[in-house]
Each structure stands twice: as structure tokens, then as C-alpha cells.
């Protein structure tokens, strides 16, 4: 039995990962027919079920920060997950990114946590990333991301390392590579110099990203 997750229902080989447990529930209700709660240990809510197309899919919360996400992914790998797409939020660093925009991560730079701290680039699974970018279509664009221990943008390192900043993507990509799990990521721009995205708009964007991720994993 994995150290952190205590599943009470089967876990699918394909999973969508989100930080927020509430978002895991929202996406499970939006993407699955009759979703079943598969985990509630440590507040890391997880759900499994079938998509309308009949594909087995799990939705799993990963908590906050890279260390939590990496540990959850290791447990999921032990439970049989082989492909995963992260749907998360990020803060814009580069000019031109708009609130609510969806970003398909082309590479992540770890600036702390289990992904490392030297800013080295970690790439997503090439096949998943390409399919995700295609599915997002005009609703998204590719971007690099800097993953930080704390989401406080300062200095020039983060700016040089990514167009946006988050807390989990580099850790998940790096850990996925170690575990043999194909991982890609789609991020929602929820903060720019102009302000922050409200909750309703964030959830709407997360659902759009979830639909795209589900389609990629079903193909």
C-alpha cells in the first residue's frame, strides 16, 4: 500500500493531477460519469470513473508545492498510473500573457524542491505535450515555466527561466521521468501585473483544460 494515498476504488492508468482538492471534485463531476471517490487520506481527494467515451480516468489532488506533488505521483505510479497531465495555475512573468490564458508547458525550470534548484530545464513527455497543445488549440499557447518553492516572483532568475511561475510542474516532470510515468502540464494564468483571475473564471478555465486533457488521455 502506498505511503500517502489509501485508495478505496481502482486507480486508472491515466490521471489528471490538480493541486486543489475542490478542483479535483469539480473536474471529476465535469469529466466522469458516476465518479467514485478513490482517496480522501490526508485531504488529497481523488476520484475515478469512466469518461462519456468509456475511458478509465482518475482525478487526483496533489496538495500544495513540488514536494507534495512528487510524493503523490510516486504513490500513483505504485498504483499503476502510467500517464498524467497536470492542470494547475501560474503567475505571469513575461509580458503578453493574459488572465485566463491556458499554457501548454514546453519546459519547466526547477528553482527549488525535488526537481532541483539550479534552474535546469525539464521537458514534458513529448507525445503528451504535443497532443495537449493541439487540443488546447486557439485557447492556449506553449510556454516555459519556472517552478518555485514559494510563489513569490523576485529578482531576475525566475524571469530568465520562464514565462510564468508555479510551484509544481518541474517537480512532477522530473519525478515522472524517474518513475517512467509520462507527464505533461497545462497551466491557467491566474495572476498578472494587471491583477488576479476570479474564482469563477479560474474554474471555467480549469474545466476547459480538463476537457482537453481528458481527450488527450483518451486517445
Image: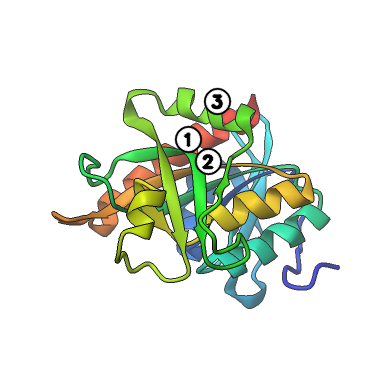
Residue 194 lies left or right of residue 184; in this view the side is: left
Q: Residue at x 57, y 52 (%)?
A: 17
- Whole-percent x, y for residue 7 in the image: 75, 63
On the image, the x and y values in percent for residue 172 come to 61, 54
Per the image, the residue denoted by label 3 is 131
Viewer can see residue 59: no
Mark 2 vs mark 3: which is more N-terminal? 2
Dot 3: element:
helix
Instruction: Please name the residue that numbered disc 1 is placed on.
Output: 211
Q: Which of the two marks, 3 or 1, is nearer to us in this view?
A: 3
Indicate left or right for 208 with 82 as reference: left
Along the line of sight, the residue nearer the viewer: 183 or 51: 183
**Residue 111 is at least partly visible in this image:** yes
Q: Are marks 2 and 3 in contact (CB under 8 Å)?
A: no
Residue hosting label 2: 31
Badge 2 density bin: few <14, some 14–19, many ≥20, Cα 10 Å: many
Where 183 falls versus 53 (above or below)?
below
Amino acid at each position: 500500500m502506498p505511503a500517502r494515498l489509501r485508495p478505496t476504488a481502482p486507480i486508472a492508468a491515466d490521471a489528471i493531477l490538480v493541486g486543489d482538492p475542490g478542483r479535483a471534485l469539480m473536474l471529476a463531476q465535469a469529466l466522469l460519469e458516476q465518479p467514485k471517490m478513490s482517496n480522501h487520506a490526508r485531504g488529497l481527494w481523488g476520484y475515478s470513473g469512466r469518461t462519456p467515451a468509456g475511458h478509465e480516468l482518475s482525478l487526483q489532488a496533489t496538495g500544495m508545492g513540488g514536494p507534495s506533488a512528487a510524493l503523490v505521483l510516486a504513490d500513483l505510479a505504485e498504483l499503476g498510473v502510467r500517464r498524467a497531465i497536470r492542470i494547475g495555475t501560474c503567475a505571469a512573468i513575461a509580458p503578453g500573457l493574459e488572465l485566463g490564458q491556458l499554457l501548454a508547458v514546453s519546459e519547466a525550470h526547477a528553482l527549488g524542491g525535488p526537481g532541483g534548484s539550479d534552474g535546469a530545464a525539464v521537458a514534458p513527455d513529448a507525445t503528451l505535450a504535443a497532443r495537449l497543445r493541439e487540443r488546447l488549440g486557439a485557447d492556449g499557447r506553449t510556454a516555459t515555466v519556472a517552478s518555485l518553492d514559494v510563489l513569490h516572483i523576485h529578482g531576475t532568475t525566475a524571469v530568465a527561466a520562464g514565462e510564468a511561475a508555479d510551484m509544481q510542474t518541474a517537480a512532477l516532470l522530473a519525478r515522472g521521468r524517474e518513475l517512467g510515468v509520462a507527464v505533461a502540464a497545462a497551466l491557467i494564468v491566474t495572476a498578472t501585473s494587471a491583477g488576479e483571475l476570479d474564482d469563477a473564471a479560474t474554474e471555467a478555465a480549469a474545466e476547459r483544460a480538463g476537457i482537453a486533457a481528458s481527450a488527450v488521455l483518451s486517445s
